Amino acid sequence: MEQGKQGVMVAKMVPPQNPIEQLQARFKELEAGFRGWLAKQSLPVEAAVVTLTSGAQGAAIGAFMGTLTNDVSSSLPTPPPQAGLNPQAMASFKQAQALAGGPLVQARNFAVMTGVNAGISCVMKRVRGKEDVQSSMVAAFGSGALFSLVSGMGGPNQAANAVTSGLFFALVQGGLFKLGQKFSQPPTEDIYYAKTRSMLNNLGLQSYEKNFKKGLLSDNTLPLLNDSALRDVKIPPGPRLLILDHIQRDPEIKEKRGQNS
């Protein structure tokens, strides 16, 4: 009887967990598991999955945006066939239609832009082993060129307009990338953990950055990391496996590890 009462008292003393926090923690676990699974796949599989998921997200955003511009697109008069518009005028009309289309049109346009951009970025990152302004501009060029072809924007020379749109997207993306780097420079003491932070973000384990800093596991120690070192800084078994697997697969870290051995 006494034990039963004590159990009830302990249960009352333990505050119930916030359901929102539980949901967020569960989502982070699923995201980390998905990223870990994706990192182990071949390049074609990873690129296909990233392209499809990003395209689906873009389609959802485009459909929502299309509902806001649906009234604008419906107010655009469709020129009759006998109107005899010159190619430049017809191109301008198509541009207006592409930018002010309904939900389906905008869903298609956003799906192409986000999906192609994410897919090319994934391939460039896997091939080059890093994510920089060059990779970002290549991805933007591809998404801009394909967007131009799919949306029908531009004049009769689709190839030239695709290249022009791709270059415009690449220049804008490159400028935004550099601007973001300028305004998001980490504190001076964090420059020694730049690669570590990037690795943890890619794996969805950014909450363990403080563990690395507490144990002074900087970027220079990445090629030397082992299970014992990660255990010493109190990183759980699951994240330890993901981190060690990433280190084994990363070409730059593997090269440094070979030089040290």
Image (cartoon, rainbow, N blue to C red):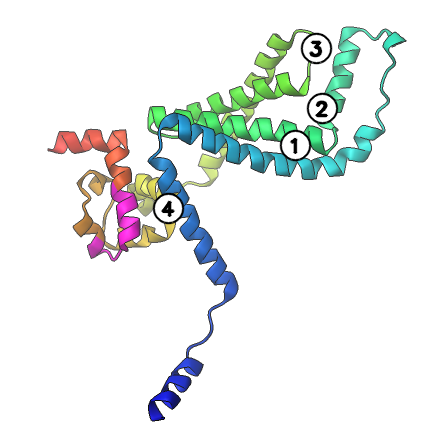
Examine the structure image and report whether residue 239 is included in the region drawn in magenta.
Answer: yes
Residue at x 84%, y 25% (from the top left corner): 76
First reached walking from the N terminus: tag 4 or tag 3: 3
Q: Is residue 32 left or right of residue 260?
A: right
Residue 98's disc is 2
Is residue 202 at all visible to an observer of this figure?
Answer: no
Q: Quadrant of residue 126?
A: top left
Q: CA distance from mark 1 to mark 3?
A: 23 Å
Q: Which residue is mark 1?
A: 107
- The kind of secondary structure element at disc 3 is loop
Coordinates of residue 202 in the picture (x, y in percent): 38, 40
Residue 187's disc is 4
Q: Quadrant of the C terminus?
A: top left
Q: Magenta region, mostly helix, strand or loop?
A: helix
Examine the structure image and report whether residue 60 is included in the region drawn in magenta.
Answer: no
Mark 2, other Cα within 10 Å: few <14 / some 14–19 / many ≥20: many
Residue closer to the observer: 86 or 41: 41
Q: Amino acid at mark 1?
A: Ala
Q: Nearer the viewer, mark 1 or mark 2?
A: 1
Q: Is residue 22 above or below residue 68?
A: below
Is residue 248 at all visible to an observer of this figure?
Answer: yes
Q: Is residue 183 left or right of residue 108?
A: left
Coordinates of residue 70 in the picture (x, y in percent): 78, 34
Coordinates of residue 219 in the picture (x, y in percent): 26, 41
Q: Which residue is mark 3?
A: 155
Q: Amino acid at mark 4?
A: Pro
